[in-house]
Image: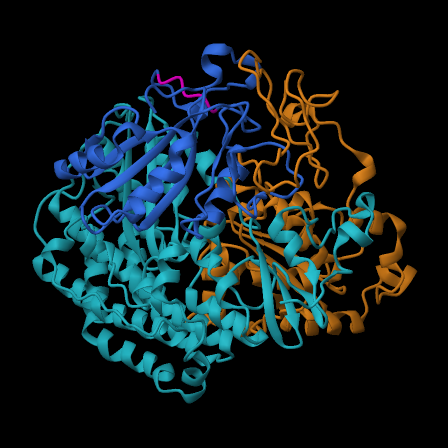
Chain colours: A cyan, B blue, C orange
C-alpha cells in the first residue's frame, strides 16, 4: 500500500527515553525488520496490548495487536511468560528424572509429553517394551486425548462467550481424570510412563471406573458435543474463520488436527506408526475446509475414534509384564535419537543426544503449540477483535508447551 | 531403516554431504556444512524423488566445542525421518543461513535457537529473543552457562548428582564443559 | 570471563566492527558475546537480576543487593500511603468492633479471585471452579478478569522472571483488602523449577503471601481447603493487609 506510515507514538524508542523504560516497559524496543514494520502505523491504526493476563485462559500469552477500528491489521505475539528452562533442567537430570520434568509442558495432555521422551530413550537403548505395557500406554493416552479434546471444546466455547459447555466438558474431563488418578496416582501431571513400560499395572478401581464410563461414554459425549455442533451462534461465528489452506499448512509446519482440518491426512499414528497402533483399527478423520469449525468438528471426530481405540485395547489386552527391567543408573551408549508421537495438538517430538553418562547431553523438545501460534500472524489480520481469540482457541495452544 | 533412501541421498546430494549417510532404526542422518544449507534444503524440498516438504524440528546443539543445528524432515517417499546436521559452526562466529525462505514456520524455531544459543540466522527478518526477557544477556543452553546452584556435572560414578555438593568453584577444565563424543 | 556483560573496551581485538546494516538484516553484526576457548569459566554465570533479591545474601555467588532498584511495592509500603484510607479506625484499630466483624464476614463469603492462572495449576483451579468441585459454594465462582474487581490473587502456576513484572503490577492494581494465595509447589518454593534460570523460586520473594497450598498440582480439594483457611484468616482478622511485607505473612501460632 502506498499510504504513508508514521512512527507510532507508542513506540518507546521515540517517546520514552531508554533510562525511564524501567521494569514496566510495556512494549519492547523495536529492533528487527519485522518490528520496525510493525511499529510504523498508518492512519487510523493503533496498538492494543492484550496482556499476559487475560480472560481467555490459554495461559500467559501477550499479543500486541495493531487495530484499525475493530479490525486487526497486524499482530506481534510476545511469548516467554512461562519459560521455565526445561531443556536446561533436563540436561542436569537423570534419564528417569527427565520424564517428570517434561510432564508440565503440555500439561493438559501430559502422557504424550512423557511418551515422546520415553520413546526417544527407548530408541537410544534399543529397548523393547512389553506388549501389555504398550497397550496400557495406548489406553491411557487415548483417554488423555479424549480429556484434552473435551477441554478444547469447553475453552473454545468459553472464548466465544458460552459458559455452559465448559462446565459440561470439565465434568466429563474430571471423570476421566479421576479414572487416570486411580491408575497413575495423579490427576494432571501423571508421571506414569517409564523407560521400558509404565509404572504400574491396571487395577480394580481403574477398570471398574473405566467400564462404567465406557458404557455411557458415547452417549454422554455426544450430548456434550450437541451443545455446540448445531448451535447457530457457534457455527456462524466459527465457520469460515481463520482458514488455513494446504500451502500455508506446509509452509508453517502445522501438525496434528490443524493440519488434518485443512485436508492433509497426515497422522503420525498411521504415517510413522509407533507402539501398537498398527494393530488397532481406527480411522484418521480429515476435513477439507480448514476453518475453525472444521478444526472443532475434527477434534470431535477424533474423540469418537479414540473411544474406538480404547474399546479395542480393552479387548485385546495381552498378559505379561508392564515394564522392562532397567538398571537404576542408566547409561546409554553415545548416540542420537529422534521420536515423534501424535499428541492431541499435533506432533510432539523429542531429540535426545546421549554422551554415555547418566544425564542426557541435549534434550530437545518440540511441541506443536509453538508453531501453531505462528499461524496467528497469518490468520488474525483482517478479522475483528472478538474473532482473534476465537482463532487462537481453535488452534488449541497450551502455553506450557509453547514456552517450555 | 531405508537403504534405498541412502543411495538416493548419495546420488542427489553427493559432495554436499560430509561423511556417509548414517542409518539407525528409523532415522537417516546426514551432515552438511553451514554454507551448503540453503542449496541442500532446496534440493531436499523440491526434488520430485525426495519431496521432504515437512519440517518437523529445528534445534541448536552445543557440543562443547562447536555449535550444530539439527533439522528433522519428513517425506512421503520414505518411512524414515531424515536428520540434517549442520556441523562445525564456530563458537566465536555462530552464523548460518536461515530457512525462512522455504518454511516460514522456521522463523520462530530459529528465534528460539538464537535465544538459547546465540546462533544468528542470516535472513530471518525477526531475529530477537522469544522466550527470555529482552535484556537477558546470556544464552542459557550453552554449555558454559551454568545454573546458579550448579550441581550439574554428573560424575557418572554412581553418585547421584543432586547429592553431590558441587559448586562451580570446584570445577576444573575437565569437568567444566561437557563435550559429547561424536554429537 | 563471565558472559554477563560484553568485554569492556568494545569488541575483542582483531575483529573490526564496521557500522553495518540494522540487526536482523542480512549481513548484520549482532552483538554476540565472544567466548574464547581458553577461558576458564570457574564461577556461575549470574545474570544480574534487578527484579528480586534473594533472601540469603550468599546465594547465587553473593550477588550484591541493589537497593536502588527495589520494587514499587516496597516503596509504596515505606511511604505509608496505603495506610491512609485503609478503612480502619486508626488508634481504635486494636479494639475489634462488631462492624469489623460483619465486614469480614461479608468479605470472606465472597472472595472473588482474579484470573491469574499461569500454568498447570490453572487447570486444577478451573476444575475447582466447575461442576464437580464447585467453589461457588463458598462464593468464589466469579473469577474476575480485571484486578480492580478482585479480592484474592490465586497465583496458580510457575512465576517466571518475565511474568513477575505483570503479576506484581496486577497485585498493585488490586484494591485493598486483598490477599494472595500461593497455589502449587512452583509458587510456594519454586518446586520442580528450583534450579531454573528463569523462574522465581517462590512468589513470597516478590509479594506477601497469606496461604500456601502445596501440591503439583494440588487437588481441587486442596485448593478448597486452602481457600477455607483463607476465610478463617479473614474472619480472625489476621489478614491485616496494611502491615504486610514481601514474604510469608502467616502469623504465629497457625
Q: Position of residue B101 (x, y in %)?
A: 44, 48
Q: Residue at x 69, y 36 (%)?
A: C49
Q: Is residue A142 left or right of residue A63?
A: left
In which quadrant of the rendered view does residue B5 lie? Answer: top left
Secondary structure character of the magenta stretch overall:
loop
Q: Position of residue B69 (x, y in %)?
A: 41, 34
The reply to whether residue A6 is visible in this rendering is yes
Q: Is residue A263 left or right of residue C11?
A: left
Q: Is residue C14 above or below residue A246?
A: above
Q: Position of residue A49 (x, y in %)?
A: 66, 63
Residue B155 highlighted magenta (yes or no): yes
Q: Is residue B1 above or below residue A76?
A: above
Query: In the rendered image, which quarter contains the N terminus of chain C?
Result: top right
Q: Position of residue B52 (x, y in %)?
A: 28, 47
Q: Residue at x 45, y 49 (%)?
A: C216
Q: Nearer the viewer, residue A7 or C167?
A: A7
Q: What's drawn in magenta, residue-wise?
A: B152-156
The reply to whether residue B71 is visible in this rendering is no
The residue positioned farthest toward the right in the image shown: C91
Q: Nearer the viewer, residue B80 or A3?
A: A3
Q: Residue at x 18, y 46 (%)?
A: B78
Amino acid at each position: 500500500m502506498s499510504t504513508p506510515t508514521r512512527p507510532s507514538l507508542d513506540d518507546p524508542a521515540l517517546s520514552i527515553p531508554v533510562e525511564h523504560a524501567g521494569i514496566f516497559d510495556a512494549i519492547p524496543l523495536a529492533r528487527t525488520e519485522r518490528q520496525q514494520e510493525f511499529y510504523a502505523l498508518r492512519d487510523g491504526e493503533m496498538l492494543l496490548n492484550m496482556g499476559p493476563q487475560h480472560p481467555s485462559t490459554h495461559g500467559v500469552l501477550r499479543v500486541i495487536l495493531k487495530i484499525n477500528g475493530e479490525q486487526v491489521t497486524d499482530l506481534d505475539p510476545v511469548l516467554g511468560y512461562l519459560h521455565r528452562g526445561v531443556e536446561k533442567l533436563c540436561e542436569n537430570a537423570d534419564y528417569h528424572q527427565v520424564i517428570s520434568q517434561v510432564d508440565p509442558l503440555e500439561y493438559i495432555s501430559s502422557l504424550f509429553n512423557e511418551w515422546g521422551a520415553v520413546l526417544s530413550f527407548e530408541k537410544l537403548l534399543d529397548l523393547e517394551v512389553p506388549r501389555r505395557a504398550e497397550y496400557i500406554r495406548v489406553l491411557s493416552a487415548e483417554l488423555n486425548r479424549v480429556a484434552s479434546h473435551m477441554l478444547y471444546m469447553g475453552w473454545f466455547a468459553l472464548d466465544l462467550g458460552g459458559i455452559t459447555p465448559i462446565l459440561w466438558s470439565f465434568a466429563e474431563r474430571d471423570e476421566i481424570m479421576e479414572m487416570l488418578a486411580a491408575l497413575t496416582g495423579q490427576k494432571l501431571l501423571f508421571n506414569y510412563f517409564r523407560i521400558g513400560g509404565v509404572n504400574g499395572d491396571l487395577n480394580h478401581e481403574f477398570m471398574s471406573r473405566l467400564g462404567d464410563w465406557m458404557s455411557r461414554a458415547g452417549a454422554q459425549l455426544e450430548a456434550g458435543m450437541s451443545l455446540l455442533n448445531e448451535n447457530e451462534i457457534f457455527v456462524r461465528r466459527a465457520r469460515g474463520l481463520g482458514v488455513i489452506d494446504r500451502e500455508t499448512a506446509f509452509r508453517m509446519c502445522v501438525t496434528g488436527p490443524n493440519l488434518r482440518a485443512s485436508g492433509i491426512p497426515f497422522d503420525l499414528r498411521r504415517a510413522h506408526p509407533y507402539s501398537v497402533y498398527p494393530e488397532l483399527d481406527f480411522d484418521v478423520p480429515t476435513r477439507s475446509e480448514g476453518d475453525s469449525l472444521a478444526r472443532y468438528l475434527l477434534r470431535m471426530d477424533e474423540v469418537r475414534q479414540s473411544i474406538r481405540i480404547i474399546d479395542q485395547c480393552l479387548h485385546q489386552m495381552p498378559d505379561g509384564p508392564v515394564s522392562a527391567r532397567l538398571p537404576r543408573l542408566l547409561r546409554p551408549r553415545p548416540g542420537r535419537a529422534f521420536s515423534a508421537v501424535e499428541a492431541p495438538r499435533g506432533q510432539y517430538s523429542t531429540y535426545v543426544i546421549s554422551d554415555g553418562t547418566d544425564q542426557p547431553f541435549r534434550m530437545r523438545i518440540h511441541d506443536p503449540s509453538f508453531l501453531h501460534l505462528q499461524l496467528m500472524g497469518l490468520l488474525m489480520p483482517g478479522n475483528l477483535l472478538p474473532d482473534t481469540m476465537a482463532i487462537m482457541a481453535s488452534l488449541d495452544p497450551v502455553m506450557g508447551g509453547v514456552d517450555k | 531403516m531405508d537403504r534405498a533412501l541412502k543411495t538416493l541421498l548419495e546420488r542427489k546430494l553427493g559432495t554436499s554431504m560430509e561423511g556417509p549417510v548414517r542409518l539407525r532404526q528409523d532415522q537417516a542422518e546426514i551432515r552438511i556444512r553451514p554454507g551448503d544449507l540453503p542449496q541442500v534444503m532446496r534440493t531436499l524440498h523440491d526434488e520430485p524423488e525426495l519431496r521432504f516438504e515437512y519440517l518437523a524440528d529445528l534445534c541448536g546443539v552445543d557440543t562443547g566445542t562447536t555449535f550444530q543445528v539439527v533439522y528433522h524432515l519428513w517425506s512421503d517417499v520414505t518411512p524414515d525421518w531424515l536428520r540434517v546436521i549442520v556441523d562445525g559452526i564456530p563458537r566465536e562466529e555462530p552464523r548460518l543461513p536461515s530457512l525462512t525462505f522455504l518454511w516460514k514456520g522456521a522463523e520462530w524455531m530459529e528465534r528460539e535457537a538464537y535465544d538459547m544459543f546465540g546462533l544468528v540466522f542470516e535472513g530471518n527478518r525477526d531475529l530477537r529473543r522469544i522466550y527470555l526477557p529482552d535484556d537477558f544477556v546470556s544464552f542459557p543452553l550453552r554449555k558454559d552457562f551454568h545454573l546458579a546452584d550448579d550441581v550439574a556435572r554428573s560424575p557418572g560414578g554412581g553418585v547421584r548428582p543432586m547429592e553431590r555438593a558441587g559448586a562451580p568453584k570446584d570445577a576444573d577444565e575437565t569437568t567444566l564443559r561437557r563435550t559429547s563424543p561424536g554429537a | 570471563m563471565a558472559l554477563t556483560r560484553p568485554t569492556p573496551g568494545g569488541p575483542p581485538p582483531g575483529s573490526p566492527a564496521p557500522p553495518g546494516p540494522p540487526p536482523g538484516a542480512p549481513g548484520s553484526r549482532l552483538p554476540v558475546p565472544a567466548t574464547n576457548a581458553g577461558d576458564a569459566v570457574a564461577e556461575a554465570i549470574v545474570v544480574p537480576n534487578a527484579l528480586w533479591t534473594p533472601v540469603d545474601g550468599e546465594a547465587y555467588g553473593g550477588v550484591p543487593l541493589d537497593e536502588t532498584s527495589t520494587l514499587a511495592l516496597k516503596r509504596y509500603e515505606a511511604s505509608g500511603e496505603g495506610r491512609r484510607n485503609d478503612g480502619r479506625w486508626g488508634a481504635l484499630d486494636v479494639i475489634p468492633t462488631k462492624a469489623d466483624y460483619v465486614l469480614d464476614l461479608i468479605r470472606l463469603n465472597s472472595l472473588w479471585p482474579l484470573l491469574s492462572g499461569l500454568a498447570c495449576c490453572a487447570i486444577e483451579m478451573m476444575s475447582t471452579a466447575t461442576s464437580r468441585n464447585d467453589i461457588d459454594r463458598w462464593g468464589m465462582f466469579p473469577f474476575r478478569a480485571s484486578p480492580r474487581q478482585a479480592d484474592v490473587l490465586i497465583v496458580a502456576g510457575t512465576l517466571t522472571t518475565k511474568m513477575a513484572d505483570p503479576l506484581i503490577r496486577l497485585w498493585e492494581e488490586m484494591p485493598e483488602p486483598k490477599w494472595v494465595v500461593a497455589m502449587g509447589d512452583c509458587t510456594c518454593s519454586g518446586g520442580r523449577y528450583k534450579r531454573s534460570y528463569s523462574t522465581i523460586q517462590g512468589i513470597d520473594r516478590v509479594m506477601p503471601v497469606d496461604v500456601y497450598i502445596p501440591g503439583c498440582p494440588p487437588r481441587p480439594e486442596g485448593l478448597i481447603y486452602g481457600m477455607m483457611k483463607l476465610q478463617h484468616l479473614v474472619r480472625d482478622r489476621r489478614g491485616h493487609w496494611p502491615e504486610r511485607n514481601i514474604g510469608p505473612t502467616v502469623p504465629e501460632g497457625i
